[in-house]
Amino acid sequence: MSRIEKLIERLKAKPKDLTYEETEKILNSLGFFEYNKGRTSGSRVEFKKNNKKIQIHKPHPGNILKPYQVKIILNKLKELGEI
């Protein structure tokens, strides 16, 4: 099992300590790229792949995603047919 496959399995398990970097690696491996809407977007980022979008807020001050964010990402990836 590759490192990315392990990260995807980790995401599916809905961990309480998933980092933003791990999430970014997962989404990048699936073809999504981070898009910041400009200076006024604050911590809000969007990951785009063609016409598919996933919007989240970068966690701060820490680096750990909240459980609701993990759920949103997982549900969106399933809805888009990516996992």
Image: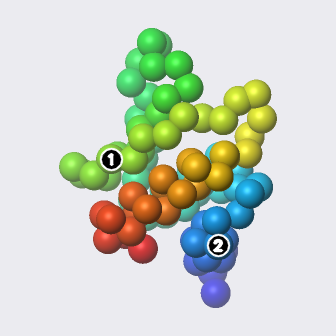
Would residue 81 appear left or right of 7 to someone viewing this image? left
Residue furthest front as drawn: 68
For the N terminus, the image quarter is bottom right
Measured as percent of width and height from the top left, residue 60 is found at 70, 30
Task: Give residue 53's mark.
Answer: 1
Earlier in the chain: of badge 1 and badge 2, it is: 2
For the C terminus, the image quarter is bottom left
Residue furthest left as drawn: 51
Residue 29 appearing in the image:
yes
Which structural element holds mark 2? loop
Q: Which residue is label 2 attached to?
A: 13
Q: Tell me the quarter of the picture where residue 57 sits.
A: top right
Q: Amino acid at mark 2?
A: Ala
Q: Amino acid at mark 1?
A: Lys
Residue at (40, 53) in percent of width and height: 32
Task: Give residue 27's mark.
Answer: none
Q: Can you say whether 37 is above or below 63 in the image?
A: above
